[in-house]
Image (tube, rainbow, N blue to C red):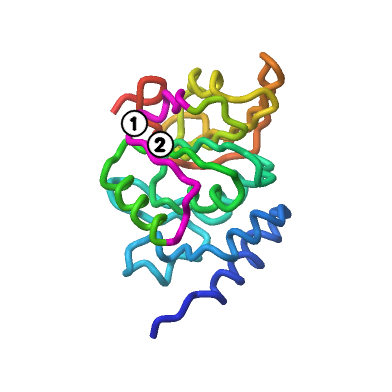
Amino acid sequence: MNHDYRLARERMVKNQLMPRGITDKGVLEAMSKIHRHLFVEEALYGEAYNDHPLPIGQKQTISQPYIVAVMTQSLALTGKEKTLEIGTGSGYQTAILAELSTMVYTVERINPLLDKSRELLGQLGYTNIRFKAFDGTLGWEEFAPYDAIMVTAGAPKIPQPLLDQLADGGRMVVPIGNKYSQELIKVTRIKNRYREENLGGCRFVDLIGVHGWKE
């Protein structure tokens, strides 16, 4: 039976997101709409809407729905933003950002993941996403500055190129810490100052690159 998991999506939004402070209408709508199970292996379809991360191969994961929602909500997207995503991964977070941004630029260093995401997001009809295989800690200078930047891997410190590529008034969310646990940091750029806000603990795979962890 090929069901569309609509009830599972509704339950995810009602039970995992709304009671834990996710109030952004755009985020709730995007997460109700996007078929999260398509972004994991078929064997994991039944797990796709549960409250935990899942493996997607290449030692990478798809974040738990709540973390996706917290990070997206923190960017306060209005639909007009040019958004940079560091770490395409499964492409699920990319799809959420594409629902809420004018244009998404997404960078992934692992080619097989990038190819798979590009193909899936194309099949789902997204035309406002550009992909690049590259070291995400260097950002994507060609299209800077960005109104919003999301980093979906943990870094020892905020990569300087990403701070440089953030527009005035822009928001960035990035997990900062050691390899075992991080704090979710929201950065807002005000001219040449950067205001930081701690959104709480999290755990991500390593951000590998020149301004991140060494492989």
Determine crowd level at label 1: few under 14, some 14-19, many 20+ residues with C-alpha closer than 10 A. some
Determine crowd level at label 2: few under 14, some 14-19, many 20+ residues with C-alpha closer than 10 A. many
* Coordinates of residue 60 in the picture (x, y in percent): 35, 46
Q: Tell me the residue at 32%/63% (across/down).
A: 41
Q: Is residue 40 left or right of residue 81?
A: left
Q: Secondary structure at mark 2?
A: strand
Question: Is there CB contact under 8 Å for labels 1 and 2?
Answer: yes
**In this picture, which residue range is highlighted in magenta?**
124-142
Give residue 134's mark.
1
Q: Is residue 133 left or right of residue 8?
A: left
* Coordinates of residue 68 in the picture (x, y in percent): 55, 50
- Image quarter (top left, top right, bottom left or bottom right) of the N terminus: bottom left
Is residue 130 located in the magenta-colored stretch of the structure?
Answer: yes
Instruction: Tell me the quarter of the picture where residue 107 sits.
Output: top left
Is residue 72 located in the magenta-colored stretch of the structure?
Answer: no
Q: Secondary structure at mark 1?
A: loop
Check disc 2 and report the residue beneath it. Answer: 107
Q: Earlier in the sequence, mark 1 or mark 2?
A: 2
* Coordinates of residue 49 in the picture (x, y in percent): 50, 65
